[in-house]
């Protein structure tokens, strides 16, 4: 079946512009995560949705970052007034749920959107 | 916060065995994942450990010691295609399953 898809794959924005990044999770997956990955680093957690509810947004670096998942499927990460430090790969991941009897569900990652702010 | 430590780079020879170590903070442990990430691609799931011991999956094995806050990923019979970044990630919250990643270990396999 189809995996997690993200669009666009590449985005170049001028400093100060707003951008919107889209994530299509695997159908039926309850949990959706956004991560930010700087060059040469591991992904860093941004925010988490359980269906349409945003239950954790502790990783969003500033109030310029906003995420939504209005119908519990597709999610959009919006960055307002982009800055050069926002340049990174933005990864979306989904999972069936968050906790099984034996532990935690694995997350399936999309290919990411590479954002470059000039 | 939770600190995940793993070596930045490793080099190994095709056909050999390599062990990639990872240490993490033991407080509030909820499980540990290993992911593989080729350059420019999505991380893909390799293994998950929540109990002590060794989990084997073909050429890849992962070990966990909860008392020591230590895990390793063992790759056997290395192939050129194993050249990638290997990410150790701790489950940061039992309520959400969010992952706290290490910086990743870039493995270069040489002929």
Image (spheres, rainbow, N blue to C red):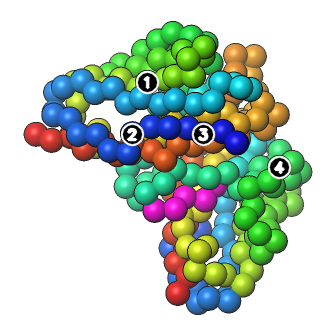
Give the residue at the far top of this rendering.
B53
| Numbered circle sitting on residue B7 | 2
Mark 1 residue element: strand
Name the residue that disc number 1 marks: B72
Mark 3 or mark 1, which is nearer to you?
3
- What's the residue at 49%, 23% (across, down)? B71
- What's the residue at 60%, 14% (across, down)? B67
Magenta: main secondary structure equals strand
Name the residue that disc number 4 marks: A56
The CA distance from mark 1 to mark 4 is 29 Å
Mark 4 residue element: strand
Q: Which residues are magenta?
A: A35-39
The CA distance from mark 4 to mark 3 is 20 Å
Q: Position of residue A21 (x, y in %)?
A: 66, 70
Have a look at marks 3 and 1 and say if they share a chain. Answer: yes
Q: Chain of mark 2?
A: B
Residue A1 lies in the magenta-colored region: no
Mark 2 or mark 4, which is nearer to you?
2
Evaluate if marks 3 and 1 touch, with contact meaning CB atoms under 8 Å apart.
Answer: no
The CA distance from mark 3 to mark 1 is 16 Å
Name the residue that disc number 3 marks: B3
Whichever of callouts 1 and 2 sits on the residue coming sooner in the sequence is 2
Whichever of callouts 3 and 1 sits on the residue coming sooner in the sequence is 3
Mark 1 or mark 4, which is nearer to you?
1
Q: Chain of mark 3?
A: B
């Amino acid at each position: 079946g189809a995996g997690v898809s993200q669009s666009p794959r590449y985005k170049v924005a001028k400093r100060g512009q707003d951008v919107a990044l889209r994530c299509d999770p695997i159908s039926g997956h309850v949990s959706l995560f956004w991560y930010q990955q700087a060059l040469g680093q591991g992904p860093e957690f941004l925010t988490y949705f359980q269906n349409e509810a945003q239950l954790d947004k502790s990783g969003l670096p500033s109030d310029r970052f906003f995420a939504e998942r209005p119908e519990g499927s597709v999610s959009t990460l919006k960055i307002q007034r982009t800055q050069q430090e926002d340049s990174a790969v933005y990864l979306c991941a989904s999972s069936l749920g968050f906790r099984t009897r034996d532990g935690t569900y694995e997350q399936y990652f999309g290919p990411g959107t590479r954002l470059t702010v000039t | 916060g939770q600190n995940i430590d793993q070596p930045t780079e490793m080099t190994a020879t095709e056909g050999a065995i390599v062990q990639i170590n990872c240490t993490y903070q033991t407080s509030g442990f909820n499980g540990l994942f290993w992911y593989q990430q080729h350059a420019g691609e999505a991380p893909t799931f390799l293994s998950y450990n929540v109990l002590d011991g060794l989990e084997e999956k073909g050429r890849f094995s992962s070990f966990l010691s909860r008392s020591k806050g230590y895990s390793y990923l063992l790759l056997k019979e290395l192939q050129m295609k194993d050249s990638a970044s290997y990410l150790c990630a701790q489950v940061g919250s039992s309520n959400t399953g969010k992952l706290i990643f290490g910086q990743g270990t870039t493995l270069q396999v040489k002929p």
